[in-house]
Image (cartoon, grey):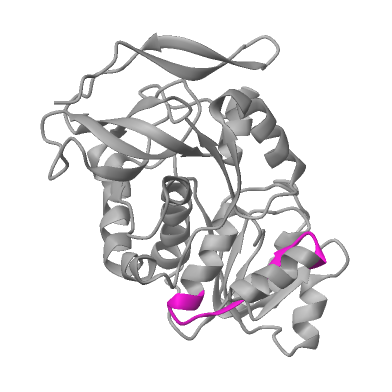
């Protein structure tokens, strides 16, 4: 039996100046339906940056420590933890607490690590997998053969989303912030990637004969993209918002919404309950894991930082220079 240490390292936030530091605290014990994981790697998400600034407080029952996804080894299980056993290698969507070398995760939000992936690559999966599956396939009903536009294609969600949509038979378009990123996204499977800093995606797609032909749009931008999304969407099109980096307010002509019978929706992953996320995990195992196991879909890791450099890693994410996931290694 693996001995569970008494203390763990974790990243703490100073509420006054929002600086972060490594501190020591007790290793949590798994309760019913939970796994205790020895963390090898943790993924960074924009939600972490907002939480650090006090703009995205965790739910009352969640860990106050940042970090929403990890990969590592199961050290212990609580009651009703399903088929998981100590020694299993897992990647997991946590309920907070990922920026630590030991953390808890709901057993229902844990996934096996696909065969050829490293721990760092596995840590890049959970948040993006659930976000892509829930928004594009559960909420928007994306079907093989349809055309999908993924904004923010160079993000962890974007890169994995492009690969998944391509593997499932969709025609993928995307936007990114540099010509270099655009070419890389086309190599990843996008039919066309558009530099939103130097071009207008609505104009480019219209010139390519795609106005009113984009079936599903996944948007992290908002702001001035909101009207352009409506304008470019196909009749019966579905548009889903998961963030508003360019702003949550815009003056919008909703006339085309009626004429084209569009659906506008949105979601955040963290606000959904464990039962909803468990359904996502089950469907991901059935529909996406075969493509992960075959290598047709693979997460893109941009860079790996040691836990002690969590602040540096977050600064790099804030800069927007990365393509794919930024990972903390324990």
Dividing the picture into quarters, in which one does residue 154 lie?
bottom right
Which one is nearer the viewer's eye here, 301 or 135? 301
**In which quadrant of the rendered image does the N terminus lie?**
top left
Q: Going by the image, does 136 lie left or right of 27?
A: right
State whether residue 240 appears in this view: no
Judged from this view, the residue extending furthest toward the right is 198
Query: Which x, y percent locates residue 256?
Result: 68, 74
Residue drawn at x 36%, y 72% as measured from the top left: 294
Q: Nearer the viewer, residue 115 or 313?
A: 115
Q: Give the residue at x 57% y 53%.
A: 156
What segment carries the magenta color? 166-179
Q: Position of residue 16 (x, y in %)?
A: 67, 9
* Residue at 69% over, 54% down: 221
Q: Nearer the viewer, residue 6 or 215?
A: 6
Question: Residue 292: image x %, image y %?
Answer: 38, 65
Q: Is residue 173 magenta?
A: yes
Q: Position of residue 173 (x, y in %)?
A: 64, 75
Give the residue at x 42% y 29%.
Answer: 96
């Amino acid at each position: 039996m693996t001995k569970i240490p008494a203390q763990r390292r974790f990243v703490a936030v100073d509420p006054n100046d929002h600086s972060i530091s490594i501190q020591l605290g007790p290793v949590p014990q798994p309760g019913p339906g939970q796994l205790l994981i020895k963390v090898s790697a943790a993924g960074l998400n924009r939600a972490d940056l907002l939480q650090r600034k006090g703009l995205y407080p965790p739910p009352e029952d969640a860990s106050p420590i940042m970090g929403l996804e990890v990969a590592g080894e199961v050290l212990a299980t609580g009651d009703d933890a399903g088929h998981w056993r100590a020694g299993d290698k897992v990647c997991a969507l946590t309920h907070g607490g990922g920026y630590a070398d030991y953390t808890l995760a709901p057993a229902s939000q844990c996934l096996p690590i696909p065969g050829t992936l490293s721990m760092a690559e596995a840590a890049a999966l959970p948040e993006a997998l659930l976000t892509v599956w829930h928004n594009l396939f559960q909420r928007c009903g994306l079907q093989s053969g349809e055309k999908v536009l993924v904004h923010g294609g160079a993000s962890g969600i974007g890169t994995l989303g492009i690969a998944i949509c391509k593997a499932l038979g969709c025609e993928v378009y995307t936007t990114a912030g540099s010509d270099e990123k655009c070419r890389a996204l086309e190599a990843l499977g996008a039919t066309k990637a558009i530099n939103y800093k130097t071009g207008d995606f609505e104009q480019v797609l219209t010139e390519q004969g795609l106005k009113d032909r984009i079936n599903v749009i996944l948007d992290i931008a908002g702001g001035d993209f909101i009207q352009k999304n409506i304008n470019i969407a196909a009749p019966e099109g579905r548009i889903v918002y998961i963030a508003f980096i360019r702003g949550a307010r815009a003056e919008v002509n909703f006339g085309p919404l009626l004429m084209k019978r569009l659906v506008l929706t949105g979601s955040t992953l963290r606000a959904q309950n464990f039962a909803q996320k468990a359904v996502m995990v089950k469907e991901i195992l059935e529909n996406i894991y075969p493509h992960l196991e075959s290598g047709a879909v693979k997460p893109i890791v941009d860079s790996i930082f040691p836990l002690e450099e969590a602040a540096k890693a977050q600064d790099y994410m804030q800069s927007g220079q990365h393509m794919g996931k930024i990972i903390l290694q324990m």
